[in-house]
Image: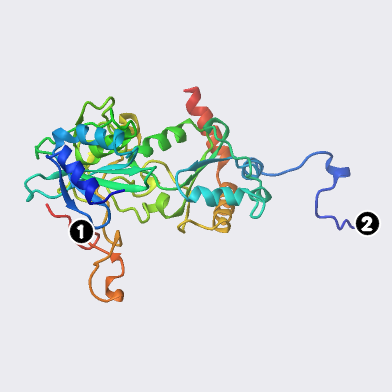
């Protein structure tokens, strides 16, 4: 179904979108303002009736548009995937139009992207955290957030009073296991990576 | 006539058994541990296996898994305790009636295990007092049974009577 004609036709109808690459499946780029228009067209005219995934990527502070929303669609009739990349313009407080009105399944996906990256999906019916607790002050999948975590009080005051427990940075020694991805397989084996202070290395002040 | 009986003689002693209060209380307690399965991850699957027929936890008198904290006295924390779940684990522990014990089953519940991350509490002993830790990821059912028998030994050596009296005295004040 996805052939030259299809792509030409789609780009003619939606001149704001571009083909990014076609390595695994057709990947389009689309400005955030036009995302509702494009997804509605893909759903109603091109049989892309299933929202497979909606997530986001933090491309780092060096990139002009730091946060990119990635949408995967699937056509149950033609058995084809399509991917849409769309940049959020504001790096400080990123916003993105919610596609909940087009694909209701996006509800929880957008909540997750909000929880992890802090992207506010405008028009979302219930935009609150889905994985971390409501009072959590950070967005953990942003590049500047350390994997070990940051000191934060636990949400339940009465439990804290009894246990004196709090959210503490996890010790990184002995885990997590990451692969260097380079060299011979024996060198590229996943192994523990020290990212933070440990029992041996003092906590930096 | 020389008596060679050293044990209990019902004809002489009647229906009286002499023992220590601790021994009786602990004997009752350790043979009817009612576990509260706090299943949070894959360890809970092994916990289910140890309750099923092949490993059969009921051989040791602790098969009565209760999903209400009010009816149970041993919480088996089986799985990864996230910071979000920690509050719930503590609340359920608080709702259990005394006496109560906690078993941290597996690497995650004991130390955070392989999850060195912002989301996972590094050991459930940060919020509840743990009696027995079980190693493994996940532990085999045999390991859990061994831990539960260790817990029975521990219950058997507790100063239960003095604790009961102490609790009565403090509640009267």
Which residue occupies the extreme top position in the image? Answer: B173
Q: Nearer the viewer, residue B6 or A77?
A: A77
Q: Nearer the viewer, residue B118 or A3?
A: A3
Q: Nearer the viewer, residue B98 or A198?
A: A198
Residue corresponding to mark 2: B1
Measured as percent of width and height from the top left, residue B138 is found at: 48, 56
User: The residue tagged with tag 2: helix, strand or loop?
Assistant: loop
Question: Which residue is found at the position 62% from the left and 41% from the top?
Answer: B29
Residue corresponding to mark 1: A195
Residue B24 as seen in the image, left or right of residue A37: right
User: The residue tagged with tag 1: helix, strand or loop?
Assistant: loop
Q: Which mark is residue B107?
A: none
The relative height of residue A14 versus residue A100 in the rendered view (above or below) is below
Q: In this figure, which colouring scheme has been used for the structure?
A: rainbow
Chain letter of the residue carrying label 2: B
Question: Which residue is found at the position 52% from the left and 39% from the top?
Answer: B100
Residue A178 as seen in the image, left or right of residue A28: right
Measured as percent of width and height from the top left, residue A37 is found at: 20, 32
Pointers 1 and 2 in contact (C-beta within 8 Å) = no
Question: Which residue is found at the position 42% from the left and 55% from the top?
Answer: B107
Q: Is residue A154 visible?
A: no
Q: Is residue A185 visible?
A: yes
Q: Residues within 10 Å of mark 2 (few under 14, many from 20)?
A: few
Measured as percent of width and height from the top left, residue A173 is found at: 27, 61
Residue B164 as seen in the image, left or right of residue A88: right
Chain letter of the residue carrying label 1: A
């Amino acid at each position: 179904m996805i052939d030259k004609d299809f792509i030409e036709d789609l780009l003619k109808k939606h001149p704001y979108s571009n083909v990014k690459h076609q390595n695994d499946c057709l990947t389009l780029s689309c400005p955030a303002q036009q995302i509702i228009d494009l997804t509605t067209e893909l759903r109603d005219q091109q049989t892309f009736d299933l929202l497979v995934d909606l997530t986001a990527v933090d491309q780092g502070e060096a990139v002009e548009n730091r946060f990119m929303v990635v949408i995967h669609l699937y056509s149950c009739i033609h058995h084809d995937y399509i991917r849409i990349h769309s940049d959020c313009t504001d790096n400080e407080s990123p916003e993105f139009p919610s596609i909940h009105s087009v694909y209701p399944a996006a509800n929880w996906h957008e909540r997750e992207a909000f929880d992890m990256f802090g992207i506010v999906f405008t028009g979302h019916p219930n935009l609150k955290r889905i994985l971390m607790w409501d009072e959590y002050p950070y967005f953990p999948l942003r590049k500047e957030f350390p994997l070990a975590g940051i000191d934060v009080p636990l949400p339940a005051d009465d439990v804290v009073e009894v246990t004196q427990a709090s959210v503490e940075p996890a010790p990184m020694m002995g885990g997590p296991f990451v692969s260097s991805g380079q060299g011979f397989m024996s060198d590229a084996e996943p192994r523990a990576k020290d990212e933070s202070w440990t029992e041996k290395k003092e906590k930096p002040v | 006539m020389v008596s060679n009986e050293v044990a209990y003689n019902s004809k002489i002693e009647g229906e009286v058994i002499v023992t220590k209060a601790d021994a009786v209380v602990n004997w009752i307690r350790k043979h009817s541990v009612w576990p509260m399965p706090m299943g949070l991850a894959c360890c809970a699957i092994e916990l289910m296996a140890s309750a099923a027929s092949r490993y059969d936890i009921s051989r040791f008198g602790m098969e009565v898994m209760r999903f209400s904290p009010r009816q149970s006295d041993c919480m088996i924390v089986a799985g990864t305790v996230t910071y979000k779940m920690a509050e719930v684990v503590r609340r359920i522990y608080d709702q259990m009636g005394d006496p109560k014990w906690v078993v941290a089953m597996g690497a995650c519940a004991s130390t955070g295990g392989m999850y060195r991350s912002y989301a996972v509490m590094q050991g459930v002993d940060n919020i509840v007092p743990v009696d027995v830790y079980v190693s493994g990821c996940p532990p085999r059912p045999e390991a859990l049974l061994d831990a539960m028998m260790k817990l029975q030994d521990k219950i058997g050596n507790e100063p239960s009577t003095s604790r009961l009296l102490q609790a009565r005295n403090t509640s009267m004040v």
